[in-house]
Image (tube, rainbow, N blue to C red):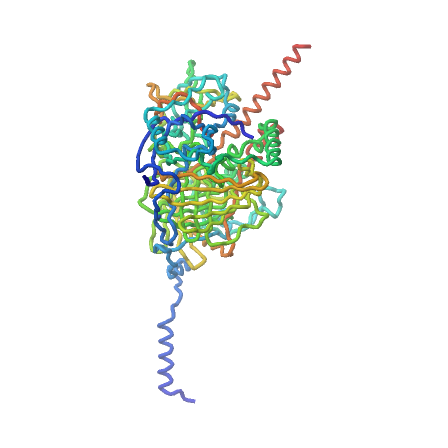
Amino acid sequence: MQIGFKSWMLLAATVAAGLLFTRIPSKAQGGAAAQAQTYRAPRTADGKPNLNGIWQALNEANWDLEAHAASQGPVLALGAQFSVPPGVGVVEGGAIPYKPEALAKKKENFANRTKEDPEVKCYMGGVPRSTYMPYPFQIIQGTGTIMMAYEYAGGVRIINMGKPTEAPVDSWMGWSNGRWEGDTLVIDVTGLNDQTWFDRAGNYHSDALHVVERYTPRSADTLMYEATIEDPNVFTRSWKISMPLYRRVEKNAQILEYKCPEFAEDMLYGHLRKQPSK
Amino acid sequence: MKHLYFAPVCALTIAIVLLSSVNAMGQAKAYTPPKTADGVPDLQGIWSMLTNVPLERPANLGAKEFYTPEELAAQAQRAAAGGRAAAPTQPGTTADVHYDLSQFGLDRGHATVASSNRTSLIVGPEGKVPPLLAEAQKRQQERAAFQREHQWDGPETRPLTERCILWASEGPPMLAPGYNSNLQIVQGPGYVGIMQEMIHDVRIIPTDGRAHLPQGVRQWFGDSRGHWEGNTLVVDTTNFTDRTAFRGSTEKLHVIERFTRTGEETIKYEFTVEDPSAWAKPWSAEINWAKTTGPIFEYACQEANYGMANNLSGARATEKKAAEAANKASQEQQ
Amino acid sequence: MNAKLGTTFMSLALLLIAVPVWAHHAFSAEYDASKPLTLKGKVTKWELVNPHSWIHIDVVGPDGKVTPWMVEGGSPNSLLRNGFTKNSLPAGTEIVVEGYQAKDGANRAVGKDITYSDGKRLFLGGSAPGAGGGENP
């Protein structure tokens, strides 16, 4: 049966209308980032992007930032309960660009990780590790100040959202100056000491570490977190990690206490007991 | 039970910025605090909790709860004229084995102290912590006896402050430590965050009316829930561990705090403490806080707690010396 | 007459008010009251950490031998609020430490008073004699 001209016109118009109102997803690199750019976060009462809430990463970055297969954990007695889960990695470009001598130090860290990993000793996670440790953290946006409270070891950062200031001293959680770029919270972190690690695999840095974080709302319940890491003492160039952060949406979500000094006492001081434990 | 002895603590330098004089309670002109963008009273900022008012009223003052303006003025004059300096410690004594607080700016001369006309932080005619109930007292004594015997056995028998678990004053209720007596309040929608300088602990207080944690979940800081009554933030805290032991309290400790902005630079902090296993009746206190310049620097305690290892090492060395001396003595007798 | 409730920033001389003071058990367990010492040396590192800061110095003995010592001090937080920074005590600065030695014989001391070699007091002044009196270790 013949399709009349009018019908073809109608069909063509419909198709054209359809094309006009359809957004074809771009195949540009970083599909998630592209999607994030199209999402506009709700605003707080004072007009800022609303990042308030309890957030947590859901990946294996705390075990090892780089892509890795499953492997035996550091405590044989815990068998498969505490062995290393595999991860596709969060380092853009794949490998962390160590200087050759620094890579040797990383390997040494790995070999000694059950004694040397600050996480074992209940030392605060530093930046960026605190973001992706397997514990939630909470963002409280105040006036001119943002508080980030981490469940692990009660770590906390006060982000200065006013005129940037300089760190007079090094600290575990660093010195944070923040600003808004569109919907993205950008935090410039300096004043980090050389004591923290990036993960349980011994990836480390010096006190020249400089981190720039970007928290971009991706949807109502997700943020994209990116951290650019710079440390001329240890790496040949700056490098970047990125990962989503997920909102803890359960109604009773709450940052609980993980006051861990007592959990680390035996490994730190057991040998000094009256009845030594080792 | 920790060993306590009382010594006069005197300020060394005096910086007087007289903004206005203090008035007895109940006569304050009503102050309307600014509001946050969310429309609740704004408590944000960095505050000093340090006070010159003792928790308990000096015995000689009886039921006198407030100093008169004249008495306060006389105290200020004596202070300006140069109060009695701290008693020098004698070389070779325990008290002398310490760094100098003033050298590090940890003395009161370098702190911000809000004024108050109270004679004691504890309110009411008695002005004292009620006596512990018999069972609670017994428990305190047993703990103290155990402490005396075992205080150097290992980290577990050391005080919570030395273990970097909890500073004695953190509460709730929050009382000022001797130095670094500062806290920072940040308010976001539905939450009030309070960060105490020692030991960088954050109390996150939801104000959305949710229920407390289940009874089986106990925390050093308990579990806090807040709500607004007019211009006052009221915070209810339960779910304490039995090791928090605020002045002999048990896991039944229940604390109600009230935070009211009373001026551009002041907050009135009140608390009521009750524990039917510790005290026959609740008791309450009131403290003025003053805005202070920050920032609050990181007090990372666990991370550089050399003292724990050094103290235990010192204790082992002392024991070893004593054992060697005893051996030598018994050998000489043979 | 009603006076406004306000704030007076002052430090009162607490002539009448007594404040509980913890006995310094911890320090007296770590350091030996019967081993006072005076150390003179060049700063190698200043650790601005809590709960106590540490000044590391190299002490040169009469035989020319260099011995590293570490000297315990107070929390640095108030110093930082008073404008000091991690650069305020540069390596190479010569200081004199009066204090007490560690009980376990290590080259560690608590610094009761610290001065530059010209006698000027380190960090903050204050004419207070005596080292103790605080509410915390």
Name the residue rendered at 51%, 23% in the picture: C28
> Compared with residue B27, is residue C21 higher up or lower down, i.e. above or below?
above
Look at the image and tell me whether residue B15 can be seen.
yes
For the N terminus of chain B, give its image quadrant. top right
**Callout count:** 0
For the C terminus of chain B, give its image quadrant. top right
Give residue B170's position: percent from left, percent from top: 48, 38
Q: Is residue A41 left or right of residue B17?
A: right
Q: Nearer the viewer, residue B196 or C14?
A: C14
Extreme residue toward the right, this view: B334
> Compared with residue B228, is residue B140 higher up or lower down, i.e. above or below?
above
Q: Nearer the viewer, residue A14 or B36?
A: B36
Give residue C92's position: percent from left, percent from top: 36, 24
Give residue B160's position: percent from left, percent from top: 53, 34
Give residue A265's position: percent from left, percent from top: 56, 35
Name the residue rendered at 52%, 53% in the picture: B211
Q: Nearer the viewer, residue C88 or B80?
A: B80
Q: Nearer the viewer, residue C27 or C130?
A: C130
Q: Is residue B23 left or right of residue A264?
A: left
Look at the image and tell me whether residue A206 can be seen.
no
